[in-house]
Amino acid sequence: MPLTTEQAQELADARTAAAETRRATVPALEEILFEAVPVLDHGFVRVVDYMGDDAAIVQAARVSYGRGTKRVSEDEGLIRYLMRHRHSTPFEMCEIKFHVKLPIFVARQWIRHRTANVNEYSARYSVLDREFYVPAPAQLAAQSSSNRQGRGDVLEGEEAARALRWLRDDATQAFDHYEAMLNEDETAAGYDPEGQGLARELARMNLPLSTYTQWYWKCDLHNLFHFLSLRADPHAQYEIRVFADVMLDMVRRWVPLACRAFEDYRLGAVEVSAPGLAVVKRMLAGEAVEQKGSGLSPREWRELMAVLGR
Amino acid sequence: MPLTTEQAQELADARTAAAETRRATVPALEEILFEAVPVLDHGFVRVVDYMGDDAAIVQAARVSYGRGTKRVSEDEGLIRYLMRHRHSTPFEMCEIKFHVKLPIFVARQWIRHRTANVNEYSARYSVLDREFYVPAPAQLAAQSSSNRQGRGDVLEGEEAARALRWLRDDATQAFDHYEAMLNEDETAAGYDPEGQGLARELARMNLPLSTYTQWYWKCDLHNLFHFLSLRADPHAQYEIRVFADVMLDMVRRWVPLACRAFEDYRLGAVEVSAPGLAVVKRMLAGEAVEQKGSGLSPREWRELMAVLGR
Amino acid sequence: MPLTTEQAQELADARTAAAETRRATVPALEEILFEAVPVLDHGFVRVVDYMGDDAAIVQAARVSYGRGTKRVSEDEGLIRYLMRHRHSTPFEMCEIKFHVKLPIFVARQWIRHRTANVNEYSARYSVLDREFYVPAPAQLAAQSSSNRQGRGDVLEGEEAARALRWLRDDATQAFDHYEAMLNEDETAAGYDPEGQGLARELARMNLPLSTYTQWYWKCDLHNLFHFLSLRADPHAQYEIRVFADVMLDMVRRWVPLACRAFEDYRLGAVEVSAPGLAVVKRMLAGEAVEQKGSGLSPREWRELMAVLGR
Amino acid sequence: MPLTTEQAQELADARTAAAETRRATVPALEEILFEAVPVLDHGFVRVVDYMGDDAAIVQAARVSYGRGTKRVSEDEGLIRYLMRHRHSTPFEMCEIKFHVKLPIFVARQWIRHRTANVNEYSARYSVLDREFYVPAPAQLAAQSSSNRQGRGDVLEGEEAARALRWLRDDATQAFDHYEAMLNEDETAAGYDPEGQGLARELARMNLPLSTYTQWYWKCDLHNLFHFLSLRADPHAQYEIRVFADVMLDMVRRWVPLACRAFEDYRLGAVEVSAPGLAVVKRMLAGEAVEQKGSGLSPREWRELMAVLGR
């Protein structure tokens, strides 16, 4: 369970409050506002705030005075045009703020996206909860033999059991020692009233990378799409992809027109290189092209054929 | 008048619509939402949207679950602490979007702030309105003799009259030729039904830097404070400072606690250098310090004495 | 001529100096270092400094200790892989600094690329040279009738002559008045020893957008490629494209392997949308697909057919 | 020892190569180029490349044609003026690239500085070395009782011994299991020829935050100064401050004039708030001011008195 009773109560309270606003408002997103959607064993994503909607993209693209959008079909046409032609600035006019709880090794991939605003829970200042990620058995994959950066088959039998045991036991022991070194909890077993307690900023380094952290993460829609194009991609590590998938669902509620354009023109699109395009043209002209003589390396050829479903 | 009747109507329409939201809402800012506050002779600033409030800064700093803020006095204490110690990330959790109409030479200074999102009216795509900035006589200043980057006394007499005349007449002529070169307005005097019309992206280059442009400009609170600290400063050019002053008023409505902290610790604060601090300490100890022997250059000495009001 | 004799001498002097360094050095780029390559009627681009080379991309991707690159063919394979899979961070490890002289309306498009470092000549602080852009007759294009953001046929006859005359005469007059308002040049015709001279920061606004400015512009290779992909593109305005073309040539000298990968996988590549890919697959399977029933809008269909050369 | 014999050899090789260049070159920095300066028990910092020098700051500020700087004293005056008045863009014209080996919990603080380019060693792709940070006994500090984010006295006796033992033993065990789960090293004790080996991207999460990682980190001088102002500060955690201190020494070699200005006007400077300045003025006028009636909170008062050395 990602939330304590107290936290769940705080969320419920926040959800009952309502105010009147003149701002662009999206009922479908309001519906799930503040709700913590569970991800992995202890993580979650929730939308804390948002600015703008599909119409705000159109409004900015037109630098218009009112909110008065034209007909929806025209708006959709414009949004698709902007997406297709990489006019990114109007998409930057929408902003969304998430509260995310995630394992530290996932946070380390995520933070590479530099265009967001981030406020992370500080383990220098506060004590971390005893929560760490242990993969579900179905996710306990072997190293891929073909892709140095990917996963192969699921581990089974004793090798799997041993890995799960170590991941759980090593983390448990690390947290036991973390808490004992801190010596802050007077009710704990080994509490020593004479002990000074190790500084929090030092004790934390005993914890594993599977430990959960949390942050507020705020991003504009253009850069969020970029994040999702990399992290909702099959090449992304499973443990970050599940977060991206949940966020993509939330974006669909928020800006349905922009999101559909994104899925058509980015997420589901393929980039065909200059030499690759030459190959496609020859094939369309009826020629039987082979890798040899295609101008593509064997690897490029395989990638292109995969894209074309051949 | 910065707005046409039609534009004013669009704004009025936008202001009447209201919806219910669970998001943080600031009544004092809602009150002026969408309103175009006039700046200079044809410019304006208006708030188009916002995200967050003072409590959202606290919420992010605490990475908290609910909106439930503690007592206001505690929130203010925390906000002031964050500002004083340059913990900037919680301030990034608030976002505001402006629609601004401004002379191009002002836009060129403004755009140097790279951390904002901008969507500008395109003169490649559209035709610019016939609007350009002419300073009020009280703003028609001579070059400063002491500061290569500043203004001196107000010009008077024929020199002033001539400058105003040229600024107005040259711009008027440039617009006349711009419109004639475009050859788009069939009702215009020199319209030539046989003419092809010069491309908009070329014709615009005849216009002066005093021409008005407009944009949507969106920024987080931390970076907005940085913008205001540079542009609401007496060293900033008057024509950008008047925009910053109006925006500062809007920020005061939006996040009053954060804004007061900003005014105390940034805008009204002074930075005293290491050698300057040594001088202050000696003076506080009763020593009569002079520039010679102070470790400061004559210029640094003058700047420090000015700060100390001596 | 973009350079005065004095400036040309300064450049020549800089080019004769040489020092020993342990840093990665690229002879082909050193050859043209500091040289001002003319662009448009008064502009130029010159490389002022650079950091890194093709091997530095490989070195960063491998986080290696020495400079010892493996065989060139392996390096090229890795660089192409990085480009194809959008692993952008190794390309950020190369940096280049340009000195550019360009018309202000071009500078306004250019500055939208926010990831560069820029230091522009200040017209608040200094007086601008009397230099403005007048298109060559072959570039004096009509507004495109099909593309609101593009050019059509070249203007001819009196319409062309009149436009050139206005562009030249209006700018000349604006500069005459600029200089007279400044009243700084004692040797000038209308110089008034009693006049105070209008502040530079005000007088400049009389100048047209065709006026030349200049700046130092520094960018990493990844972001430079992004800039070039947008500005060396046929949809970019001619007046910025000519700068991008010159810079692309310089990049070819600097990092030939990375630049070839960029041209194959970015500049010459096409992005095919999800519905577009479905169409290509059906066509490759021998089906005679038409717009109707393709799932593409007429516009999307036209764009796809253009890409496929049909 | 942070380097293997092979790595040390690679560095030595890189240091012997030399080429001729027309670029700005800094002999004092060339002297230590590529050298790995040890930090903490297994970490290091080394300069891999640099662009520009003190003169390059001046050159950009003047947007000049040649390298020809004026007299050094004039250059220094200009650099100090730029620093004092927060004209930051000329400092962005210098760039430096570091290779850093550092514990992951330090890397997590460091990466918050978003304006740098980073290429980190990938534990998805490669296997991490068995290296983790264990504090020297003199750094094993208790939690501060007055500052929730700081350290107090050094731990002693059994509490210290136990902490060191746990930090070392838990990490050792985590690495043992990491390597066994990977099952990649055929010469290792528990190697199982039948085992598939857990995916690297999963196995790594068993490792503690004290594990060393490494990256290439590239930054411009302005943003590096900002980094140093926060991380070479006494409030920064010791384990990142030692890196910042080493980098500050390197910057002193690289751009001595700019670095001195930075130390005078940033690092050693104090910011006095608007109400704080009012207090200083009253004190300088001979008044005996007390907290009560000063307009400052008790905490602000204490902080101001500390700054003034009273």
Image: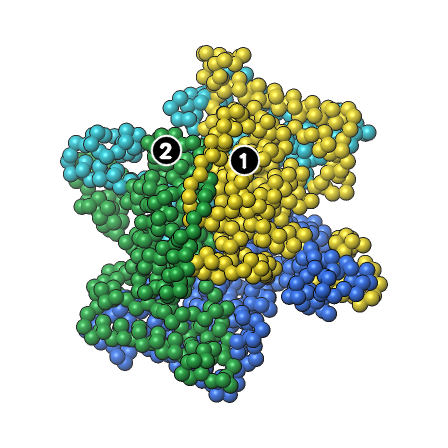
Chain colours: A cyan, B blue, C green, D yellow
Quadrant of the image containing the C terminus of chain A: top left
x and y, in percent, of residue A62 in the image:
39, 61
In this rendering, is residue D50 above or below C73? below
Along the horizontal axis of the image, is B194 left or right of B112?
Answer: left
In this rendering, is residue C138 above or below A282? below
Q: Chain of mark 2?
A: C
Q: Amino acid at mark 2?
A: Asp
Q: Secondary structure at mark 1?
A: loop
Front residue of C269 and C239: C239
Marks 1 and 2 share the same chain: no
Residue D65, quarter of the rendered image: bottom left
Front residue of A303 and D172: D172
**Alpha carbon distance from label 1 to label 2:** 24 Å
Residue C241 visible (yes or no): yes
| Residue D151: mark | none
Front residue of B80 and D272: D272
x and y, in percent, of residue B243 in the image:
53, 68
Along the horizontal axis of the image, is A156 left or right of D139?
Answer: left
Residue at (56%, 50%) from the top-left corner? Answer: D255
Q: Which residue is mark 1?
A: D35
